[in-house]
């Protein structure tokens, strides 16, 4: 999918996304080091314990469209690392894991501060669903650390310009009880068409009527970048959309999903627009300290 041409956000299984779109919130920065899994203290909460929120990043080693895609670099940073950084910068997220069948991806994930969970071959092929990877990672993480996850996220590392604010917004929507499931969306104003039997019909409009943009209902494009689900509900539904689904608005300029080499090339060209420049140094200042 390229930005922002595609279909408006729809939910599978007949669930319709809420028409209320919540803007992204600016999260507080996470510390550089993440504590070992355990109850997360929240001074603002009456119980002193906040929800356990697990971000799962599926990252297979194989890719038909772009070989080695999840380790491909944009602005000098591998895609899987960019996703880990976005998740670790979201204040509501307590833990980040990468689900992978590839050792180099696992190594990159750990170096970036995430856990890595080995994905079985049975759910590592081209036909495996993202939900299967998230369910496996959720079960494995809980068993490994003897914790109960309250909210689970599906975060795609093929969306290179995902921000911590985007991740925080979907996570907080579910963690606060505002929704059972949430997804990132962007405003969409295009006219969609579908061909059938030698003719073309409007999908989100009547082709016999051409309303002004301001007179049309607002459509939303599912960005494919981040989803959040109540963990118990996700286990029951075995799908990312269930119950009350809340679309969270993101910057349409950042909507880009890498599916083929052209998408990767575009991401690399656009990266300077979305990546903060390095801190300026004097010529003889020497290397910056971390």
Image (cartoon, grey):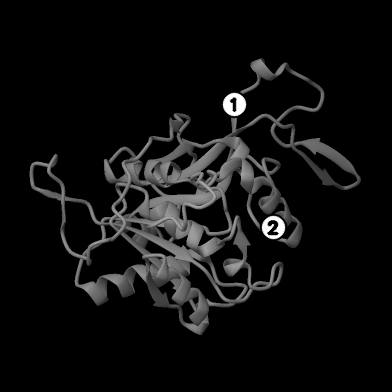
Give the image quarter of residue 182: top left
**Number of on-image labels:** 2
Residue toward you, 88 or 1: 88
Q: Which mark is residue 218?
A: 1
Answer whether labels 1 and 2 touch (C-beta < 8 Å): no
Using residue 233 as the reference point, say whether residue 188 is left or right of it: right
Mark 1 packing: few (<14 Cα in 10 Å), some, or many (20+)?
Answer: few
Residue 204 position (above or below residue 10)? above
Q: Quadrant of the C terminus?
A: bottom left
Q: Residue at x 72, y 16 (%)?
A: 212
Q: Position of residue 184 (x, y in %)?
A: 49, 43
- Which residue, given by chain and number where applicable, does mark 2 sit on? 264
Residue toward you, 6 or 108: 108
Q: Residue at x 31, y 37 (%)?
A: 178
Q: Classify mark 1: helix, strand or loop.
A: loop
Q: Residue at x 27, y 41 (%)?
A: 177
Q: Which mark is residue 162?
A: none
């Amino acid at each position: 999918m390229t930005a922002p041409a595609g279909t408006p956000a729809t939910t599978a299984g007949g669930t319709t996304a809420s028409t209320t779109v919540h803007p992204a919130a600016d999260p507080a920065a996470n510390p550089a080091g993440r504590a070992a899994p355990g109850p997360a203290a929240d001074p603002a909460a009456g119980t002193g314990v906040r929800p356990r929120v697990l971000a799962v990043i599926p990252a297979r080693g194989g890719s038909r469209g772009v070989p080695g895609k999840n380790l491909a670099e944009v602005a000098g940073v591998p895609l899987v690392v960019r996703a880990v950084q976005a998740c670790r910068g979201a204040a509501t997220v307590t833990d980040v894991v990468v689900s992978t069948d590839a050792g180099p991806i696992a190594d990159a994930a750990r170096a970036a501060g995430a856990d890595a969970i080995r994905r079985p071959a049975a759910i590592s092929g081209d036909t495996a669903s993202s939900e299967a990877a998230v369910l496996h990672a959720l079960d494995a993480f809980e068993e490994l650390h003897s914790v109960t996850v309250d909210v689970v996220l599906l975060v795609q590392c093929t969306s290179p310009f995902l921000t911590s604010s985007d991740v925080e917004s979907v996570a907080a929507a579910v963690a606060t009880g505002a929704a059972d499931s949430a997804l990132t969306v962007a405003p969409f104003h295009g006219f969609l068409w579908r061909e059938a039997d030698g003719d073309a019909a409007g999908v989100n409009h009547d082709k016999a009527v051409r309303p002004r943009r301001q007179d049309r209902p607002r459509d939303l494009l599912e960005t494919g970048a981040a989803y959040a689900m109540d963990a118990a509900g996700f286990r029951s539904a075995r799908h990312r959309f269930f119950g009350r689904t809340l679309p969270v608005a993101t910057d349409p300029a950042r909507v880009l999903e890498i599916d083929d080499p052209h998408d990767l090339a575009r991401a690399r060209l656009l990266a300077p627009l979305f990546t903060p420049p390095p801190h300026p140094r004097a010529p003889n200042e020497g290397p910056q300290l971390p």
